[in-house]
Amino acid sequence: MKTIKGPGIFLAQFIGGEPPFNTLDGVAQWAVGLGFKALQLPCNHPAIFDLAQAAAQGFKLVINNRPDGEDPSQPSSAEIEAAAKAAGLAYVHIPVRGGPTPDQVEANHRAIEAADGPVLAFCRSGTRSIVTWSLGQFQADERSADELVELGAQAGYDLSGAFPR
């Protein structure tokens, strides 16, 4: 199985109103400058959630881990899919409520493996997406629990309870 050509960073805690954290391009350039190869983005900041810009940055697939109707102000999966396709991006909806199921972990992992390039996965805060991705990496024996917990901590997420010990 393929792995994301890491390292990756999960950006929910960095997005804000000040450059470089107020545009997708700014965040992407900042992350590249630090040596990161993959980004995990929240979808609740309008300056960041720009699928045409994501396509221009080289992303090839959007994974939506957010269930429809989670927040009345969020766009529906069908609306996001239409925007993704209009931007030339592939799209997969794997809605996760609470913790991901084994089927969701597998579907997420398969989608990432099949992608033709960088993947933009999102949920409201990034937590469900990083947990779903991490469990896929762990279950495929691509990364150890300790490595994934450390990667999560570096990105501001506590994954210590996500893996069987």
Image (spheres, grey):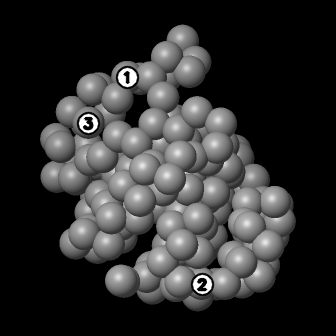
In 3D space, how far apart are the residues under numbered discs 3 and 1 (Cα atoms)? 9 Å
Residue at which label 1 appears:
76
At a point 63% along the width and 57% down the height, the residue shown is 131
Mark 3 against mark 2, which lies toward the viewer?
A: 2
Give the answer, above or below, for where 165 lies relative to 48.
Answer: below
Q: Horizontal and vertical percent for residue 141?
A: 53, 83
The amino acid on which the numbered mark 2 sits, given as a three-letter code, is Arg
Kindly indicate the quadrant of the structure image that contains residue 164: bottom right
Q: Secondary structure at mark 1?
A: loop
Q: Earlier in the sequence, mark 3 or mark 2?
A: 3
Q: Secondary structure at mark 2?
A: loop
Q: Give me the C-alpha separation between circle 3 and circle 2.
A: 30 Å
Which mark, by number, is residue 81?
A: 3
Q: Residues within 10 Å of mark 1 (few under 14, many from 20)?
A: some
Q: Position of residue 130 (x, y in %)?
A: 61, 59
Q: Is residue 80 left or right of residue 152?
A: left
Q: Is residue 74 visible?
A: yes
- Residue 21: image quadrant is bottom right
Which of the two discs, 2 and 1, sits closer to the camera?
Answer: 2
Q: Please state which of residues 139 and 131 is positioned toward the viewer in this rendering.
A: 139
Tell whether 119 sits left or right of 61.
right
Left/right of residue 123 with respect to residue 81 in the rendered view: right
Q: Position of residue 39 (x, y in %)?
A: 53, 66
First-in-chain label (2 vs 1): 1
- Where is the N terminus found, in terms of image quarters? bottom left
Q: Which mark is first along the chain, 1 or 3? A: 1
Amino acid marked by disc 3:
Glu
The residue pinned by badge 2 equals 143
Alpha-carbon span between mark 2 and mark 1: 33 Å
